[in-house]
Amino acid sequence: MRTPFCIGLTGGIGSGKSSAAKIFQELGAAVVDTDQIAHELTRRGGAAIAAIADHFGADCIAADGSLDRSKMRRQVFADPKAKRKLEAILHPLIRRESRARIAAAQQPYVLVVVPLLLETGAYRELIKRVLVVDCDEARQIARTVKRSGLAIDEVRAIMAAQLPRAERLAAADDVLHNDADIDALRRQVEILHAKYLALARAGSHEAGN
Ligand SMILES: Nc1ncnc2c1ncn2[C@@H]1O[C@H](COP(=O)(O)OP(=O)(O)OP(=O)(O)O)[C@@H](O)[C@H]1O
Ligand SMILES: [Mg+2]
């Protein structure tokens, strides 16, 4: 299977991964978003719904046929075994779909958005560079609460399950500092986009194709 030049985009909850990915996409990068794929797999008729209903019971499926996400989130937070089971259903499906999309991409490079890239080591064999979106924790919490309606304590619990900010930054090849407005983020993305285009071009010469 052909593998294009892949950058792994990660960052804590609410740091700005989706916002940054959208800008990269507008500039012409391919974006493969594993959260978005997970969402597609768990909406009405999604490929994971039958297996989830089989294991967790019809109760965890909402009236519209999609996964009842808040119910499931509560269940997996309370029960590590349930969490592992849900992951065992979802992860292989997410990986398979991500790989297919990466292989099909026609753009010069692919940004693979993986919230737990560093925590799980997933996609390491595909990814040439790690890009971390960073912002201070108070902003992370405020943005997530505003967007998702989660309680502050729920956001903190999710953050506690993610890598500490300093460790994430230490693993980064590139960093987007998302502490100001979207225009400031856009300016940084533009610079990185130019860099990634150049790296993708250099990489494809090296590979002789
Ligand atoms: N620089 C910014 N200025 C103002 N709002 C921002 C900025 N960056 C992101 N946001 C807002 O903060 C919220 C979280 O951003 P975004 O969805 O991009 O983060 P994320 O890392 O993808 O979050 P998640 O981990 O939940 O997927 C969104 O509502 C987004 O519009
Ligand atoms: Mg996101």
Image (spheres, rainbow, N blue to C red):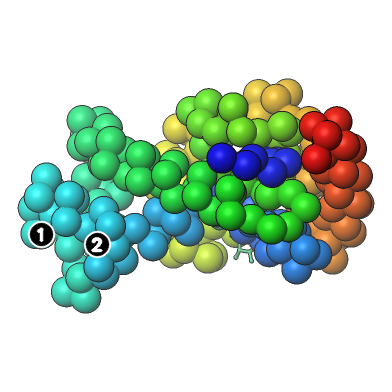
Q: Amino acid at mark 2?
A: Asp
Residue 164 relative to residue 73: left or right: right
Q: Secondary structure at mark 2?
A: loop
Where is 131 relative to 51, above or below?
Answer: above
Residue 156 visible within the image: no
Where is 85 relative to 39, above or below?
Answer: above
Where is 24 relative to 83, above or below?
Answer: below
Of marks 2 and 1, which one's residue comes earlier in the chain? 1
Name the quadrant of the N terminus. top right
Q: Which mark is residue 59?
A: 1
Q: Nearer the viewer, residue 74 or 57?
A: 57
* Residue at image location 17% in from the left, 63% down from the top: 61
Badge 1 crowding class, 10 Å Cα cut-off, few under 14, some 14 to 19, many 20 or more, is: few
Instruction: Measure the C-alpha gap from mark 2 to mark 1.
Output: 8 Å
Give the residue pinned by disc 2. 68
Q: Position of residue 133 (x, y in %)?
A: 71, 45
* Residue at image location 20% in from the left, 30% down from the top: 81
Q: Quadrant of residue 150?
A: bottom left
Label tally: 2
Circles 2 and 1: CB distance less than 8 Å? yes
Q: Position of residue 95 (x, y in %)?
A: 44, 42
Residue 13 relative to residue 148: left or right: right
Q: Nearer the viewer, residue 79 or 125?
A: 125
* Residue at image location 48% in from the left, 58% down from the top: 36
Badge 2 crowding class, 10 Å Cα cut-off, few under 14, some 14 to 19, many 20 or more, is: some
User: Which residue reaches farthest bottom?
Assistant: 64
Name the quadrant of the C terminus. top right
Q: Position of residue 107 (x, y in %)?
A: 73, 57
Q: Amino acid at mark 1?
A: Asp
Residue 187 visible within the image: yes
Where is 13 relative to 186, above or below?
Answer: above
* Residue at image location 51% in from the left, 44% down from the top: 99
